[in-house]
Image: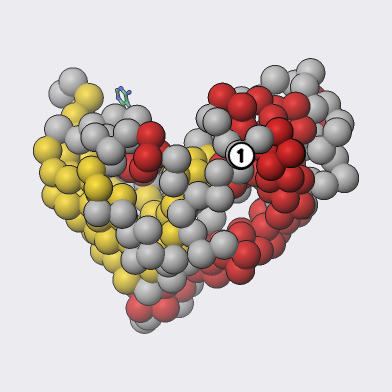
Amino acid sequence: MRIDITDVHRRYGDLEALAGVDFTVEPGDAYGLVGTNGAGKSTLFRLIAGHERPDAGRVEVGGRDAAAAGWRVREEIGFLPEDPGFPPGETGRETLAFHADVRGIGSGPDDAAARIEGAAATVGLADAIDRPIGGYSKGMRRRLGLAAALLANPSVLLLDEPTAGLDPNGVAALREVLTRVRDETNATLLLASHALREVERVCDRVGVVDGGRLLAEGRPDELADGHEDGLEGAFVSLTGGGRDA
Ligand SMILES: Nc1ncnc2c1ncn2[C@@H]1O[C@H](COP(=O)(O)OP(=O)(O)OP(=O)(O)O)[C@@H](O)[C@H]1O
């Protein structure tokens, strides 16, 4: 499914979180949103997931208005928020079963159980699925969140900073999972991340956001062209790196 963002504005009181953003993610592509803290990335995710409406402009998923389309479009979207927050006393399987149940996923108990097995295997949690989440590492919890997002076999996957706070092993494991997700599904992927190397490896196109505006977009190699440090160099020069660090 295609995602079309057209001249989108969103205000919170006096703060203009999005000040006219335009971009398109083609069906099946992986698009990376990189930006400074507070740039507006999570706000964009909430708009695309239909949790909020823009004040002006259009947010369309598969050609339909994201906020107005209701459950039919929302069902097509798998959303991994920045902090999914799972009950530590439950096992991974119990949590996924709860998600499947409240979202009405699967044509019956056997189908839901099969989807849970499949999602756990895709994210590399098959062996840990019956252990309490309290014993999971941060990376495993993140992968459980991704499994929850995958349960409905979504056409669109929204991943908000999936590698934030992970150690290099966790980042590598998640990268492997994302590559597998790309190979096994043809979901359109939107990934917000500060891990520019991961974005460079996983994404077909990248948008650089700062202060609620899209400063530049293109293929990672196009953006990185002429910068010694690749995408990181491009990011620093576009966003005036270190100006208030
Ligand atoms: N519900 C809200 N109420 C008030 N202000 C908000 C709300 N949500 C976001 N903001 C503000 O809007 C701006 C954009 O926030 P957003 O979370 O979208 O940025 P981000 O790019 O995801 O940042 P980060 O990389 O730090 O997660 C920030 O200044 C934030 O404080």
- The residue that appears at 67% across and 54% down in the rendered structure is 174
Q: Nearer the viewer, residue 33 or 210?
A: 33
Left or right of 35, for residue 96: right
Q: Can you name the residue that lies furthest to the front here?
A: 108
Question: Which image quadrant for residue 197?
Answer: bottom right
Q: Which quarter of the rendered image does ligand 1 occupy?
A: top left
Residue 9 can be seen, yes or no: yes
Q: Assign the N terminus to one quadrant of the image.
A: bottom left
In the rendered image, the vertical position of residue 160 relative to residue 2, given as above or below: above
> Which residue type carries mark 1?
Gly
Which percent across, then down, holds residue 204? 43, 71
- The residue that appears at 51% across and 64% down in the rendered structure is 186
Question: Which image quadrant for residue 111?
Answer: top right
- The residue that appears at 16% across and 23% down in the rendered structure is 14
- The residue that appears at 15% across and 32% down in the rendered structure is 55
Which percent across, then down, holds residue 146? 61, 44
